[in-house]
Amino acid sequence: MVPVIICGGVGTKMWPLSRPEMPKHFLPLVDGKSLFEINWELLRKKFKPEEIYLQTNADQAKIAQKQVPEIKLENIFIEPEVRNQGPATGLAAALLKKAGKGSEPFFLVQVDDLRVPGEKLFQMMEVAEKMCLQTDKYITGGFVPDRTVLGVDYLLKGDLVAEENGVKVYAVDDYIDRNEETRIRELMDSGRLLVHANHTTMTPDNLLSMYEKYRPDWYGPLDEIVKGAEVNGNFSRMPKGAIEEITKQVHLVGGSLVIELPFKWIDFGTWESLDKYYADEGLTPPNGGLIEIEGENNFGWSESKKKIAVVGLDHVVVVEGEGGILVCRKDLCGRVGEVAKS
């Protein structure tokens, strides 16, 4: 099994701390450590540095090497430009195949998430590896939602295919796009819906064969890279697009399996989600003190450890950092990304 940490994006919804020069997964969000450091340390419990790969861009690779100096330079795959997950995932497969690992399963680890308890990840990886070697199917992950969550894609799980150490693998009966809100609401209480949470597992050979079948315009440049052609020019030839442009079709023909995540999956997508994590874990965000007068349930983060006072307001996020100051209602934290665009 080859773990590949996927490290890209900026996390604009966590402005003003998350910025292009210091994306959210490199910020000291949890006990003074970054999500990148936490995920690396978790993988190191099972894998040696030379067994772990990282895919990112050139700027973020420099930050990663500063935070974790033991990363092997030859194990860093550089994306020359942003082309979205379709080309990016294909690039990982192509470079692994070029490195002689075409028949060895790889496992994608999204860097901006926590998995609790982390050791359960290894149980999932073992089951995913077995299923990958026994079938040629696309293997992904999902979790049972505890409430109606919109803005995410879902998988409709079918028959139980395998179970080992409490890790359950299901056939995928359907892929439900995030825009199908009516259908999502109708199926929410069915017990069959899983929020699609990635954790892709395949061999590079099998994944590239899916690219060849469903997106030959992506496969062509990737095949050239496998054969030794330069990465930059070939990667730029690939049209931007989501990996779902392939996986949707794979789901429809019964070519996929989904593993129900055996751990709690925590996605730090907004300040509100980080606030919830801190509350659940009994943690206090860094600041010089939070004073609330006729206010409650407020969240204050100060990068320079300033004191924060909130008077007459409830359910507000206040964040001070080098990039600016944010004051936002918690229920509107999903719109913070609009600030970064302005």
Image: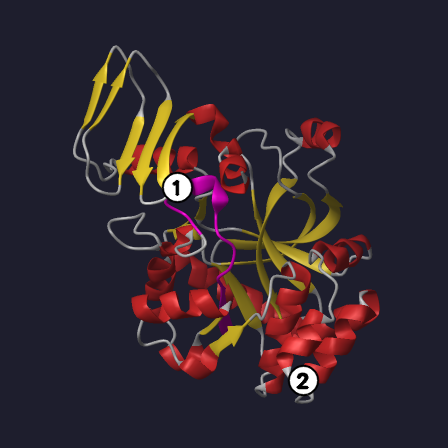
Quarter of the figure with residue 203: bottom right
**Residue named by callout 2:** 226
Q: Is residue 228 above or below residue 134?
A: below
Regarding mark 1 in the picture, which secondary structure is present there? loop
Q: Is residue 103 left or right of residue 246?
A: left
The answer for how far apart the CA atoms under marks 1 and 2 are is 40 Å
Q: Is residue 288 left or right of residue 77?
A: left
Q: Quadrant of the C terminus?
A: top right
Amino acid type indicated by mark 2: Val
Amino acid type indicated by mark 1: Pro
Q: Is residue 267 above or below residue 339?
A: below
Q: Which residues are magenta?
A: 2-19
Which x, y percent locates residue 320?
30, 37
Asked if the stretch drawn in magenta spans residue 187, the answer is no
Tell me what residue is drawn at x 28 percent, y 55 percent. 33
Regarding mark 2 in the picture, which secondary structure is present there? helix
**Residue named by callout 1:** 16
| Residue 161 marker | none
The answer, for residue 1, to whether it is visible in the render is no
Asked if the stretch drawn in magenta spans residue 7, the answer is yes
Tell me what residue is drawn at x 43 percent, y 44 percent. 268
Which x, y percent locates residue 262?
48, 51
